[in-house]
Image: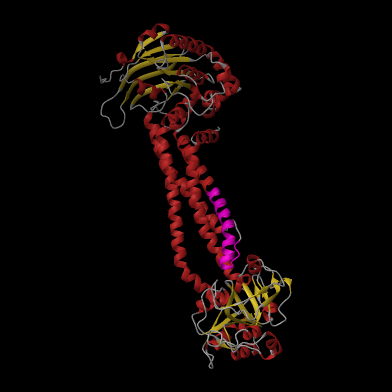
Amino acid sequence: MTEPLLEIADIEFAWPGQDHNVLELPSFRIETGEKLFLFGPSGSGKSTLLALIGGLVRADRGSLHFAGQEVESMSGPARDRLRAEHLGVIFQQFNLLPWLDVRTNVTLPCRFSRARAHRAGDIVKAAEALLAGMDLDPALWGRRADELSVGQQQRVAAARALIGSPSLILADEPTSALDADRRQVFIDLLFAQVEQAGSTLLFVSHDKDLARHFDRRISLPEINRAGVES
Amino acid sequence: MNLIGLAIRSLLNRRFAVILTILTIALSIGLLVIVEQMRAEVRDGFYRSVSGTDLIVGARTAPVQLLLYSVFGIGDATNNISIETFEQLQALDEVDWAIPMALGDTHRGFRVMGTSGDFFERYRYADRQQLEVAAGREFDDLFEVVIGHQVARQLDYDVGDSVILAHGGGRVSLQQHDDHPFTISGILAPTGTPVDQQLYISLAAHRAIHIGWEQGVQRPGAGLDAEEARERTEELRPDSITAILIGLTSRAAVFGLQRRINDYRPEALTAIMPGITLQELWRITGLAEQVLRVVAGLVVLAGLLGMLTVLLTTLNERRREMAILRANGARPVQIAGLLVFEAGLIAAAGIVLGVVLAFVVQGISAPFLLERLGLHISASLPAGQVWMVLGGIWLAGLLIALVPALMAYRRTLADGMQVRN
């Protein structure tokens, strides 16, 4: 077995000003190339885990290896660079800058990471290939992002997360704003593009119905030892 | 890394609020620049009129008052000086030239000055410039008058037209010297000084039209008729005049002569150096200028606070935008930098627009000042010092923007990866 893409050991984290931990993870791994489903109802420490993986917050204890580097001991700017280079993010909704056109939204991460822009090659062509791959009508590519429907916006967000083939795609409830049919289509398209990019997928959701599509399933409440408020 | 393009597109998206903010700053900057420029231009304009004159002599009075009524036509003389005094001063070795000024009459609101031919030959204004007759010639016949550029322009007069002078001031005068109409012999070229706002007759003519007016009104049947007056031109001379403009052979003599005139025994006189008296005048008006400056400064502050308000308000609306940028790899410093850059752009646009605005307002108000004060104001861009003040205001705008930038910085750190709405 190859090195895991991400490995967490004995992480503890409390938000500043709070006296109890929201996250205590003895161990958590993401294997390279897998599609991992993380069951995370609200209040399970899900957003904290994502912020840790993204290098936006620093753990109080423990270690986090990502893409071969120890993130917890890195400086802020270095973690920002790591995130820009190796992470693609899809949120539940409101992913796009409404005043930018679709193409420019997709190429946004390339503005913050030269490595990613380099990997993408011709960034406009790469963006268009991904938009086509996410089955978005070319007539929409030049439109302002806020003229698109929620479903279309989520596809644009997926294309943006994938541009420059980052190591890890973080998808935080990306389908919760979609109805059941579109949800299935979105996941199929996302899987195909993730495979094509050679990326790894961490898909977080509270919807257990989706879990069957994935290589591996983990329930955050089960592995998080911190007292979780109900 | 093309963050500037992002910032500009974000600004364009909020163009309505942004344009209003720029206008607010532009108005405040415009006010500040106008106050500064007008102050400098008005001072310049006043100085142009007296720059070639070494001393102004009048009856004992306050220096500022003498300066204002003699050269600028503001206020009236309370006393005259005798013609003998004029002749004695004119004869002094250190006096190069002496121009008599006999005031008191007007024509449709414009001052009439009785003077000598020396006025046309020796008077200097601005950068040692001499008066020029643009049309016609100087007065020759007793009842000829030379008029200033603005008089001709505003009353639509031409050489050969006939004018009737009024006794005393004001636009409407009940007492006219209508027994002695004057013919316009010449029109002066524009000077941008009060010279343009006056009419000029000879001292003899000034005397001739006032024979019989010794009590302030005309004694019926006491006047000279025109032919009689022309025959007696040589002996016509006024008993007194209002003021004297003096040019010296050597500027070094100015202090000594000024003291001697002020100590002159036969008559109580005041001699002033116009440049120094102008300084005195500016000291008097300085307080009002300071008040204007403070008001303008406060308005600029209000403009910058307006910008701060807009930035802080949009900060909440833009929380999502910032989280998206952050999730896509933007560093907190870059997000804070975006806000400072935005403020810098808004402030710079406001400052440039304000300067343009001030330029336009100066251009529009120039004719009004020319008509009212005879001051020639040219619309001008700010001088070096004003640009430094504007640069300081721009820096203040950047400093103010640090407040929302710092808030955004801390917020992006606290928000983590979440998109809050």
**Is residue B303 toward the left or the right of residue B57 in the image?**
left
Q: Is residue B152 left or right of residue A10?
A: right
- The answer to whether residue B72 is above or below residue B29 is below
Task: Name the residue rendered at 55%, 75% in the picture.
Answer: B173
Residue A90, percent across and down? 45, 20
Q: Quadrant of residue A218?
A: top left
Q: Is residue B359 magenta?
A: yes
x then y, percent, for residue B18: 49, 40
Q: Residue furthest front?
A: B221
Q: Quadrant of the C terminus of chain B?
A: top left
Q: Using the image as rendered, state which of residue B138 and residue A140 is in the foreground.
A: B138
Question: In terms of image quadrants, where is residue B253?
Answer: bottom right
Q: What residue is shown at x 42% (from left), y 47% (from top)?
A: B305
Q: Which residues are drawn in magenta?
A: B351-377
Question: Residue B230, relative to residue B185: is it above or below?
Answer: below
B310 above or below A82?
A: below
By secondary structure, the bulk of the magenta-drawn segment is best described as helix
User: Which quarter of the image is occupied by the N terminus of chain B?
Assistant: top right
Residue B298: image location, x then y, percent: 43, 54
* Residue B97 visible to an observer of this rendering: no
Left or right: residue B140 versus residue B104 is right
Residue most toward the bottom?
Answer: B266
